[in-house]
Image (cartoon, grey):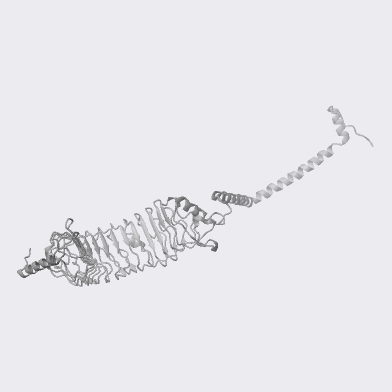
Amino acid sequence: MPNLNFAQKLLALHLLLLGLLITPISATSAVGCPTGCVCNDETYVVLCERNKLDVLPITLNPAIQRLVLRNNKIKTIDAAFQFYRDLQYVDLSNNHLVNIPTKSFVYQEKLQELHLNKNKLSSINNKTFQGLKSLTVLNLRENFLEELPKSLFSIMPKLEELNLGQNRISKIDPLAFDGLTALRVLYLDDNVLSSVPTPSFSVLGSLAELHVGLNAFSYLPDDAFKGLGKLSVLDLSSAGLSNISSNAFRGLTGLRNLNLVDNRLERIPTAQLSHLSRLEELSIGQNEFAAVEKNSFKGLSNLRKLDITGATNLQKIEKGAFCDNLNLEFIILASNKKLEDLEDGALVGLPNLKHLVLKDNSFKAFSESMVSWNELRSLEMTDNPIFCDCQLLWLSNLMTSKNLSNVQCSMPLALRERPLRTLSPDDLGCSFRDPRQQAILVTLCVSAVILLGGLGLFLFRYRQRVREALKDYKWNKRAISRKEHEYQKTFSDDDYIVRSAQQGIKPIPVTEL
């Protein structure tokens, strides 16, 4: 371990003694605790937040393990750190740090988390973090870093989370992450990268979560994330993407969560997404596509959650859009201001769908056959321009029975801003109060139409036979009439009397006038 020279030791001793002399002792603060700080010698925690400190305090308990100095005015990291060799957590966020002298952390071999975010650091090198052999979390977010040189983090073999977001990084050396064999989470979002730093990913075989949104990619080439076979979460939100190559996601066989929100995609990248067979969550709102077409998410058989929020051009969800996504449990279609056409059957055939959000769109009505409403556990339909009439009586009854979020009417004017749940069948213009009566009436009417139509079709189809049958019937009737007439003529009154006498029938007396 490097030794301090005599001058450094002497300076440190003087500072320590001075601190002990000027620091007041109170019943609630440990000895050497600066005014306004909270120091706990039992838990070895020191909290000095918003205390206007401009240097690191050197009078603290040397055994402290957790040091929080955020929101102060500290400009540099000096030799004071050498006194606190048991530190495990340090937060220097939101200070005025401009640079970090070489070997500033050489004695912090036990340090596990270091937060330097929200400072003014413009450059770091591979000696900046020398000594941090146990570090697992390094936060450099919101600084002024412009470049990541070779082997910058190689001295931190246990690092698991690295946050470099919201800097000015435009260049990353292919070996900048060399040695980070344990890295699991990497933030490179909100920088000025013009392309995905694919070569730099080759050494990150253990990476599980990557955030590279808010850059200026515009295009994802084939194998853009080569080497990241264990990646589970990929955030490409606000990356400026307008084009994605067919094989851009090739190799991401374990990806479960993909965020493509706020890009410039004019169509849903169906073929590109089909490589992600294990994908469970997809967010793809705030893009420029106008329709969710049939089989838009083909191949995503494990998809459980789909979020399409804020797609300003989206107008229609086609029937069969989710026919390959039978495991969908959660669908969010929200704040799509032009979305008014959700085709019948678009949400049918999803046996696992339990949560549905349809709020803040342009829906004027909802079909009872649109989805298996009774199977839903949660339903959000507010802020749509709903036209309330008898066709929504079923929805009113459903909302009452399942205690769902209310829907306010927009039209007709007489019902504007009135909650649908509070409206009676008469308010909705229903002629029958019981929907079952309506169903029976409709059934009877349909049956009558079908019966009459069938009879008409039968008569039309066999009209020739019917005509012949009618002719035969009329001819036979006329023939019978003639025979009866002839038969009647065969017998005279005298013949009838004679025949009656022969058969022992008493003749009816005839009175002669």
Residue 192 position in % (x across, y down): 27, 72
Foreground: 189 or 10?
Answer: 10
Q: Is residue 433 visible?
A: yes
Residue 16, percent across and down? Answer: 11, 66
Left or right: 435, with 318 as reference point: right
> In which quadrant of the rendered view does residue 324 lie?
bottom left
Q: Nearer the viewer, residue 465 or 15?
A: 15
Please count the marks in the image.
0
Q: Quadrant of the N terminus?
A: bottom left
Can you tell which quarter of the image residue 251 is in? bottom left
Please identify the quadrant where the C terminus is shown: top right
Relative to 381, is 473 on the left or the right?
right
Residue 404's x, y, as percent? 44, 54
Q: Which residue is drawn at the image coordinates 36% and 67% (left, top)? A: 265
Question: Residue placed at 50% from the left, 57% from the top?
Answer: 420
Q: Report the side of 38 relative to 249 (left or right).
A: left
Farthest residue in the left direction? 6
Q: Position of residue 332 (x, y in %)?
A: 39, 59
